[in-house]
Image (spheres, helix red, strand yellow):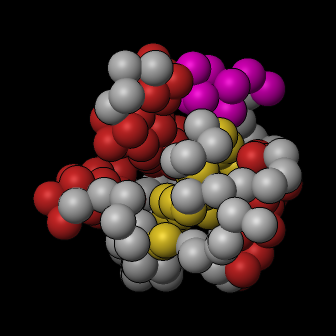
Amino acid sequence: MDIFNSEEQERVSHAIGLAEANTSGEIRVCVEHYCKQDALERATECFHELGMHKTNQRSGVLIYLSVDDHKFAIIGDHGIHTKVEPDFWDSTKEKMLTHFKSADLISGLVAGIQCAGEKLQILFPKAHDDINELPNDIVFMNRNKQ
């Protein structure tokens, strides 16, 4: 997809790898051009399409971004959602939004990844037998505007 160049994609993948280095949790980034619905609803759909609800500890976090519509959401699976403080998702979004308002999408994504990773490290420390359950690359969804 033509949204991010290879260097930008590598920066996001690297941030995910660093964030997951000390946790058994999983982080993914899903990007598409258009979102015809509420961003959180679409993020939830993508979360399930990507099988993120199938991680061992239900500790997956998805950052969803619709570039052309200027929408984004961050959601966590049941395992993490029930353990974070009530304002965690909103405060993470605010950190991301600071970068997005400056048209720096990559730094915004990295900020969200770092926040999620720090929280996952506390709540789901890396186990000795931990494996990376999900790829660290950006998932580009290809839906038409319609």
The quarter of the picture where the N terminus appears is: bottom left
Looking at the rendered structure, the number of numbered marks drawn on it comes to 0
* Of residues 85 and 43, the one drawn nearer to the viewer in this rendering: 43
Residue lying farthest to the front in this orientation: 146
- Asked whether residue 134 is drawn in magenta, I would say no
Counting from the top left corner in percent of width and height, residue 108 is at: 40, 34
- Asked whether residue 87 is drawn in magenta, I would say yes
Name which residue lies at 56% across and 46% down: 68
The quarter of the picture where the C terminus appears is: bottom right
Query: Chief secondary structure of the magenta span?
Result: helix
* Of residues 107 and 75, the one drawn nearer to the viewer in this rendering: 107
Residue 60 visible in the picture = yes
Residue 56 sits in quarter: bottom right
Counting from the top left corner in percent of width and height, residue 134 is at: 48, 79
Name which residue lies at 83% across and 46% down: 38
Q: Is 132 on the left or on the right of 107, as rendered?
A: right
Counting from the top left corner in percent of width and height, residue 102 is at: 37, 20
Residue 126 visible in the picture = no
Residue lying farthest to the left in this orientation: 7
Name which residue lies at 72% across and 80% down: 49
Name which residue lies at 66% across and 73% down: 143
Look at the image and give the residue range highlighted in magenta.
Answer: 86-94
Counting from the top left corner in percent of width and height, residue 71 is at: 65, 40
